[in-house]
Amino acid sequence: MLHGRTTLSKFIIEEQRKLEGGAELIALVNDIQTACKYIGSAVARGALAGTHVGYALGHPPPGRPGLLTGSARGSTGGVNVHGEEQKSLDVIANDIMLDSCDWGGHLAGMVSEEMEAPYAIPAQYPRGRHLLVFDPLDGSSNLDVNVTVGTIFSVLRAPAGVVDPGPEDFLQPGTAQVCAGYALYGPAAMIVLTLGTGVHGFTLDPEIGAYILTHPNLSIGADTQEFAVNASNMRFWEPPVRRYVDECLAGKSGVREKDFNMRWIASLVAEVHRILMRGGLFMYPRDTKDPDRPGRLRLLYEANPMAMLVEQAGGAASTGRGRILDVVPASLHQRVPVILGSRNEVARVERYHAEFDRGEVAFRSPLFNERSLFGAAPASP
């Protein structure tokens, strides 16, 4: 199939022939891409929306979280279910996704980062065999500075016989995903997705209003010299993560014997997109900053879909102590550590965790030669 001439709609219709029960899934993906166009339009208007943020699909029905006034880039003045500051566009994006996908008869239910409980499909609409979990606007804290944001989505099969799913029906491991992807709202609007047959990128052509296949069969190289991590949390990291980062920062003079570049955007969509385009490693590891949270990123609608994409592109995704896609969720908004990207680097970080857990390697910073409570022996490469 020639890229540059194939629309997302045509692509997924052709993929339907390879998928079991694919017709309903393909129709759902079409609804998702429609939602992403509306969300991208709202994001692009930014502060131009003023105090009356446009909502292309009309006002939310009764009982739905409503739109909040104020700048499209501003805070609603409230927090979401995670206790985080909620932007007006978070609410707008959430409602757009719900309204775009609840009516088509393809879903049994939905779960969103912005909602504490599952969203029930309205009674007037038929039910389908799939579940949709999504982060409507990942990276929304970057809206004030006009940095790339996006939407992350994951599709699961509803358990047999389930018409009105409860929270327990969404608690499926990442291996159960039948589709995962993200929309990117940046210099060019894109959708990158997998249906379990590789990873493909589509760029929105504003002249015709369609996503066009521009990046077929994306692949992540096994090795890299680039990593992304929020270094401000270094004092809270576990020793294996500090060991890895210190070795990278030591560059050619250290045990890695090569220089690394460090990146950090604070937008998961943008971080993963960079890795899919040119390789690299992304880490949001476990730390001690908040002992009640073993990780920062949400398993169902952030870690799992990104892990599926990365694995389908030949990379790896780990918590540091195991494959992300094998984690069985315990709650809708469960958080996990995330280490993903070029598979040889992920394997190295996993090895450092395993050696530390077995007590085989004491920790020392090779960059600053600082002794720590974990010992003074040099870390082996």
Image (cartoon, helix red, strand yellow):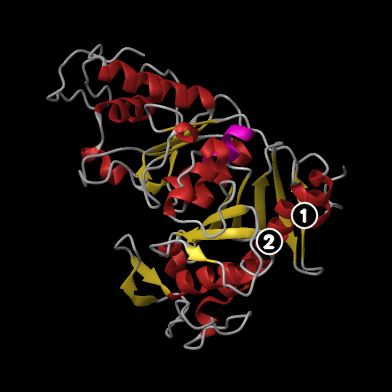
Q: Quadrant of the C terminus?
A: top left
Q: Secondary structure at mark 2?
A: helix
Query: Is residue 254 inside the magenta stretch?
Result: no
Query: Which residue corresponds to mark 2?
Result: 33
Q: Residues within 10 Å of mark 1 (few under 14, many from 20)?
A: many
User: Dividing the picture into quarters, in which one does residue 36 lie?
Assistant: bottom right
Q: Residue at coordinates 70% horizontally, 52% vertically from top-left? A: 25
The kind of residue on which mark 1 rests is: Leu
Q: Residues within 10 Å of mark 2 (few under 14, many from 20)?
A: many
On the question of residue 337 being in view, the answer is yes
**Relative side of 200 to 227, left or right:** right
Query: Which residue corresponds to mark 1?
Result: 8
At which x and y percent is residue 2?
87, 44
On the question of residue 148 being in view, the answer is no
Give the distance between the C-alpha atoms of the residues marked 1 and 2, in whole angstroms: 9 Å
Which range of residues does the magenta coloring cover? 307-312
Q: Residue at coordinates 46% horizontally, 29% vertically from top-left? A: 323
At which x and y percent is residue 302?
47, 49
Instruction: Look at the numbered discs 1 and 2 and tell me whether their residues touch, using CB distance below 8 Å.
Output: yes
The kind of residue on which mark 2 rests is: Gln
At which x and y percent is residue 177?
58, 42
Decide: is 117 above or below 75: above
Q: Residue at coordinates 27% horizontally, 22% vertically from top-left? A: 366
